[in-house]
Image (cartoon, rainbow, N blue to C red):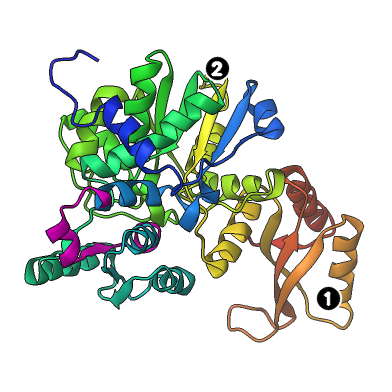
Amino acid sequence: MDGTAPLSVTLDDVRGAHKMLSGVARVTTMEGSRHLSSLVGAPVHLKCENLQRTGSFKIRGAYVRISGLRPEERAAGVVAASAGNHAQGVALAASLLGVHSTVFMPVGAPLPKVAATRDYGAEVRMTGTVVDETLHAAREYAEETGAVFIHPFDHPDVIAGQGTVGLEILEQCPEVRTVVVGIGGGGLAAGVAVAVKALRPEVRIVGVQAAGAAAYPPSLTAGRPVALDAVATMADGIMVGRPGDVPFALIRELVDDVVTVTEDQLSSALLLCLERAKLVVEPAGASSVAALLARPDAFEGPIVAVLSGGNVDPLLMQRILRHGMSAAGRYLSLRLLLTDRPGALATLLGVLSVVDANVTDISHVRTDPRLGLTEAEVELHLETKGPDHCAAVATALRDAGYTVLA
């Protein structure tokens, strides 16, 4: 930090937000993780914003932003655009403050998130198929009606509200040496960095982005926000194609490093949180844990990993868990050829039984132009016990004379 320009959000702003949020946002728990600590070789603590009201940290910034509106602005109502977490945060914050809220959500938004946003008191309008189209509709609505547009991350009040997570981290884990936090537009990471660096400048702040939506690395290289041509990741909570101007300036000044994680690492992190910490976390919320799994030797402890949200659609959760189990070697899918004769399938299943592989699904194709007259193709989906077991299953099948195609 060279101090050449004043920061748009200060520690005093975050402290003011903290007072404002008393009795509104929960002081979420911090849980130690023995499993992650053993993997990383240093104490790891999980800051559980997935247990926050509305299921994510977003209520913090939304409430502070709406609280700061003038009476005539409150009378005009507020409008927001979001696929889920920000929508719910704005809806609840507005309801608590007696302000009418309209939230635009994309047509494909998960039904539980749409229902929750309505339950928190917002008028929900389904518009567009991607968040960019939804944002455009929300801005048009603001211009037409005078409603105040509540940006999900690109406003100092929102960042100050999210920064209260940083104050809680220092209170709950005063010995912390590294804070790892996911980055989408950058509001949470910027706010946490403001609070932590002001009070403990030696603490290292590491931001995490999904590799398929990593706008910050090229933007930091360019020295300005750079928009990606396309974004694609299961972590919809951090699927943002361009950094916000306000958080970008803070992150460039205060955040020590920004790393990326793959889809496999995200799904493995979600699975780990569910199995080992008994915490339901969405892919974006688990990005900090994914970074620890990807680089277990890269962080000085004690480490605090922020679990930023837990709003995951059950159907998506099912797919992600299967993906995570596959990435962890807990699922094995393969195709193989066998001779088409009575008892051939039973013999194959006997081989799998010997190596203790549990069949979850099987497809048996006997008529296909690709197959010889006496051939059949079998597609298997198996539950396995890890990469070594997967290799042992494939070896046993080949040793038994089967041609493994994939």
**Disc 1 designates what residue?**
345
State whether residue 70 is above or below residue 6. below
Pick the quarter of the image with the N terminus.
top left
Question: Whole-Å distance between the Cαs marked 1 and 2?
Answer: 59 Å
Residue toward you, 3 or 156: 156
Rendered location of residue 312, percent (x, y): 51, 61
Q: Horizontal placement of 5 versus 186: left or right?
A: left
Rendered location of residue 268, percent (x, y): 59, 47
The question of residue 347 being in magenta is answered with: no
Q: Residue furthest front?
A: 71
**Disc 2 designates what residue?**
175
Q: Can I make out residue 186 in this image? A: no
Rendered location of residue 323, percent (x, y): 58, 57
Q: Residues within 10 Å of mark 2 (few under 14, many from 20)?
A: few
Q: Nearer the viewer, mark 1 or mark 2?
A: 2
Q: In the image, what residue occupies the spot 58% across and 44% down?
A: 269
Quarter where residue 260 is shown: top left
The question of residue 78 being in magenta is answered with: yes
Q: Residues within 10 Å of mark 1 (few under 14, many from 20)?
A: some
Q: Can I make out residue 314 in this image? A: yes
| Among numbered discs 1 and 2, the one appearing first in the sequence | 2
Give the residue type that dot 1 points to: Leu
Name the secondary structure under disc 2: loop
State whether residue 309 is above or below residue 257. below
Give the residue type that dot 2 points to: Glu
Rendered location of residue 350, percent (x, y): 90, 66
Residue toward you, 185 or 224: 185
Which range of residues does the magenta coloring cover? 67-87
Name the secondary structure under disc 1: helix
Pick the quarter of the image with the C terminus.
bottom right
Q: Horizontal placement of 73 versus 41: left or right?
A: left
Quarter where residue 139 is shown: bottom left
